[in-house]
Amino acid sequence: MPGAADLPPLRAARRILLSGRVQGGGFRPFVYRLAMRHGLTGTVRNLNGEVSIEVEGEPVALEAFTEALLVEAPPLAQPRLRECQAITPRGRQGFVILPSGGHGVAGHLPPDLFCCEACLAELLDPGNRRYRYPFINCTQCGPRYTLITGLPYDRARTSMAGYALCPACRAEYEDPTSRRFHAEPLACPVCGPRLRFKGGKEVIHDNEGALAATVALLRAGGIVAVKGVGGYHLLVAAEDEAAVARLRTRKRRPAKPLAVMFPWEPELASVRRQVVLDETEARLLCLPERPILLLRRAAGCSLAPGIAPGLGEVGVILPYSPLHHLLLADFAAPLVATSANISGEPVFTREAEVEARLGEVADAFLHHDRPILRPADDGVRRVIAGRPRLLRLGRGVAPLERKLAQPVAEPTLAVGGHLNVTVALAWGDRVVVSPHIGELDSPFSRAVFAQVIEDLQILYGVRARRLVCDAHPDYGSSRWARTVGLPVMRVLHHHAHASALAGEWPAIQRWLVFTWDGAGLGEDGTLWGGEALLGRPGAWRRVASFRPFRLPGGERAAREPWRVAAALCWTAGLPWHSSDEAALLRAAWEKGVNAPETSAVGRIFDGAASLLNLVQRASYAAQGPMQVEALAEGEGEPVPLPLCRDGAGIWRTDWAPLIAHLLRQDVTAGRLVADFHATLAHALMAQARAVAEEAPFDAVGLTGGVFQNRRLAEAAVAGLAAAGWQVFLPEALPANDGGLAFGQIVERGARDHG
């Protein structure tokens, strides 16, 4: 008889199905290398947005392999073990990566990624065949969402399908040991996309020539529209005040802050020279999504003052595409990198539209011939209460997928509001939120809105059977929803805000959520915006608010803060300087003509901006509130505000003493603004205490655009935490209207479950 040492090793086999983000990040070659390491045989393939693995070998090795699939996954992957079952060993030889199967059935769409360190090293290596090639990428970096036509994620289903790989690229693409194995946007100077510079009659098709012409024009103070990953940027020298002013004049963007892109340097040296940067912020800047991060100007900052007039912060972003790296390295100084669009609209992605609509803004254009199939603007973050908060859901993060605590009964599309619009598609317990689209005032915006909706349904293989929209009937999204022919559920604006926050922390059973913003239609037909809601998704009850006042001119008041200031003074019986326009306005206001009632804290901020003579007519949304926050000096002392119940049992805070305080002439504006913030935080605490005496709740939430104000949010968090309450602000989604679509889905799911 043979001895034990002569017996063949026991073999076992498993079938493993992994869901989550397992496509677009080098997961299959990772599985191949892992199987080789453990001496296993079998197959791996992309299948319907998931990864299917059949593997066999010694049982101990199989166990180690299965554990490593999750523990050692590539950094950009987020695998979840959906199925693992024993199967009969087949005696396979070797390990094979099979062709993908299935087509666009509820997969996980990979977002656009930054240029990784390995590719960046090659980009700057004169001995590498991709030296200074503006479209270098691998499985760990490069565009995804903006060039995909369908799932599974393969080259044939991207806008790169028309570029035939050269022999050298083909060898990398087919080598499982290469980090470029099935890197779908793979290219090189021989076979890939190319740059084209167009300035007046000058057209340059050579990559190096196009880069050199762009940098030369920027050094001369010119404005260049540059095609990137998810759309075009307008670039101009960030330290040249005259160039920045010229950009503002041409783009008719007098005050809205502009983002600044900095060259990549060790230890972020160029960034630290211009802004105050702590280690948390440094880490955020370097995230794979490469967000715009709001940072405080440093002493001696040499950036043009016109980049962010009236504000103490600058939006900072690092290069994220190889093209950006080359431009910033060659220019050797920061560049303004603002979205190439008409204010409020989505970013332009096509050569013809950017030249037609921004031809009088840009002095030249740097195009490339890799098609962008859908726009993806840069995301924006701000650190508030020690955590990064999303202000805009953009490239690198979106499409954002979340799991629903309460699944929807059937596929559902939520279309958000009217400003900062995103849309959300849900089926079962999955919901996908689109990138930021923008405002829905223009035909172009509405066309992109409809395109994104259609794209999401096609890409995920899910067709919505019903819709959710805001309760306001005149929002562009609500009007669109009524034209589709599907059942529509309307959700109150602030209920959606509260449900979005609750959806991030589903373990909390009973909430008190403060939803403060500019305005949203309430259940009583007034414009809410200073509300406290008690309950949970599907069962919110308004328990506190602010003293209502009428907005003279309706929607115009949001763009003309002097109207809000006048209304606050008229309501409180305080003096207001007179003029012919104001006299006519007051006559209409007293009769209630075009003067809707509101309780919005965002509008009170607008009134404060006017009373302090910061902004009388706003050129962009929240200009007044942002400048009010920036002006604050010191801690501030709260002004006592009366709190009492109205006839409906709602606790109401009277803001009148605060407005009277802002009219004082014996206190500096900076101190008045500090007092203003302290007063609102104190009023919030008073409302929370009043509600808590009568109704229990497990946690307090702060959401709505007003809580993007760091000073106010942090003061409120500190006070609430000191009183013993758990406090939550949005993290995965914006507190502003960019989170509404997600909240609408959460609200729909809750109502499905009664």
Image (tube, helix red, strand yellow):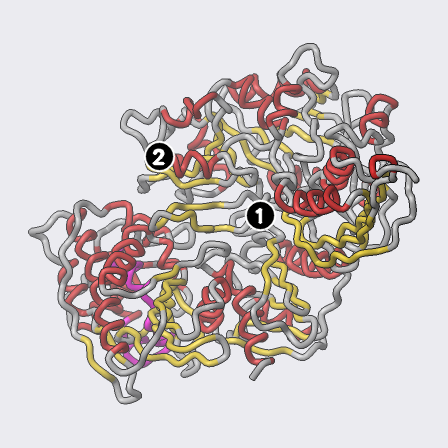
Q: Is residue 121 left or right of residue 669?
A: right
Please report whichever mark, 2 or 1, sits nearer to the chain's N-terminal start: 2
Res. 125 in view: yes
Few, some or many residues within 10 Å of mark 1 (<14, 14–19, 20+)? many
- Give the farthest residue toward the front: 1
Which of these two is toward me, 749 or 380? 749
Res 230 seen here: no
Q: State the residue at coordinates (26%, 65%).
A: 724
Choose top left, top right, bottom left or bottom right for residue 532.
bottom left
Q: Is residue 326 magenta?
A: no
Residue 241 position (above or below residue 544) = above
- 9 relative to 213, above or below: below
Position of the N terminus, as image quadrant, is top right
Give the camera-side residue of 302 and 294: 294
Q: Amino acid at mark 1?
A: Val
Q: CA distance from mark 2 to mark 1?
A: 23 Å
| Residue under label 1 | 397
Q: What are the residue bounds of the magenta stretch?
A: 586-609
Q: Quadrant of the C terminus?
A: bottom right
> Which residue has dot 2 on it?
278
Question: Callout 2, which amino acid?
Answer: Asp
Spot the residue most to the bottom.
647
Q: Is residue 145 above or below residue 571?
A: above
Where does residue 269 sit, x and y in percent of width and height?
Answer: 41, 22
Q: Residue at x 52, y 76 (%)?
A: 491
Instruction: Report helix, strand or loop for mark 2.
Output: loop
Residue 336 appears at what percent x and percent y? 48, 32
Query: Which residue shows up at 29% across the image and 70% down it?
Result: 584
